[in-house]
Image (tube, rainbow, N blue to C red):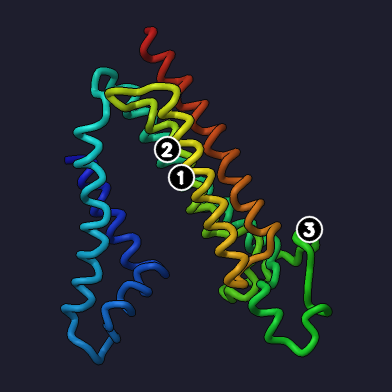
Amino acid sequence: MAALAVSYFMAVYYSNSYNGAKVRELFGYIAGETSAIWSVLSWVFWVLLYAWVPIVCYFVLDEADPDKLIMTGAAILVAGIFADNVNLWLKQVASRPRYKYLITLDDPRAAFRNWWQMIPNLAGSNDNFKSWPSGNMTIASMMFSLPMLADLLKKRSRTKNLICFFVASCFVVIYGYNRIHMTNHFLSDVCFGMLITYIIYCTVSAAFLKAGLKMTRQ
């Protein structure tokens, strides 16, 4: 029940985000013009997308060590929130112009800046100056939590752990290429978005699992 509650919370969160706006657009909803039912249906889309996760977890995860389950879940949640906020803070610190914005200017070279050439708080709410680090890569790099989940399976093995890491790595690389190809980011934006998230996940998960091990021994 707790997992389902979290799923519904995430559904509400994403239905009100940029991704939620895109889904409403896909459903053809226009505020003040079309029926509100299409907005509700777009929220139901997120509910269905997230609600199946705890159900699957119930059947595949090993409940023999509940403390480890709780610690792993907490580590993934905390690491994700922390990585997202670090990313948002760095975007404001760097305020680097996006490639897709630069190519609209008469002289893109004059406005181009490397990631270390920072002008803090220039971005404000202007998305054109939020290139570094990539926020989408922060989200995509959360796939690196897959090996942690593989350790919680009822039938776990080192091979499954390696497969999960390989799948996560392939997904992140393909996603990163897409962000560059679509002119949303530079290579350095993508690499730092992935690196920052990976380091945070490794650090937070190690700390939480170590704490969980101490609790088990007591």
Residue 143: which numbered mark, if any?
1
Disc 2 element: helix
Q: Please name whichever residue, 145 or 123, is drawn nearer the observer in this view of the structure.
A: 145
Kindly report the distance in space between the C-alpha atoms of the residues bearing marks 3 and 2: 32 Å
Would you place residue 74 above or below residue 156 in this image? below
Image position of 192 (left or right of 44): right
Would you place residue 214 above or below residue 126 in this image? above
For the residues bearing labels 1 and 2, Cβ distance under 8 angstroms:
yes
User: Which residue is found at the position 69% from the left and 59% from the top?
Assistant: 187
| Residue 110 location, quadrant | bottom right
Q: What amino acid is at disc 1?
A: Met
Q: Which residue is mark 2?
A: 146
Q: What amino acid is at disc 3?
A: Trp
Q: Which residue is mark 3?
A: 116
Disc 3 element: loop
Q: Position of residue 206 (x, y in %)?
A: 52, 26
Q: Nearer the viewer, mark 3 or mark 2?
A: 2
User: Can residue 32 be seen?
Assistant: yes
User: Which residue is found at the position 78% from the left and 68% from the top?
Assistant: 113
- What crowding class fits label 3: few (fewer than 14 Cα within 10 Å), some (14-19), or many (20 or more)? few
Kindly report the distance in space between the C-alpha atoms of the residues bearing marks 3 and 1: 27 Å
| Residue 9 location, quadrant | bottom left
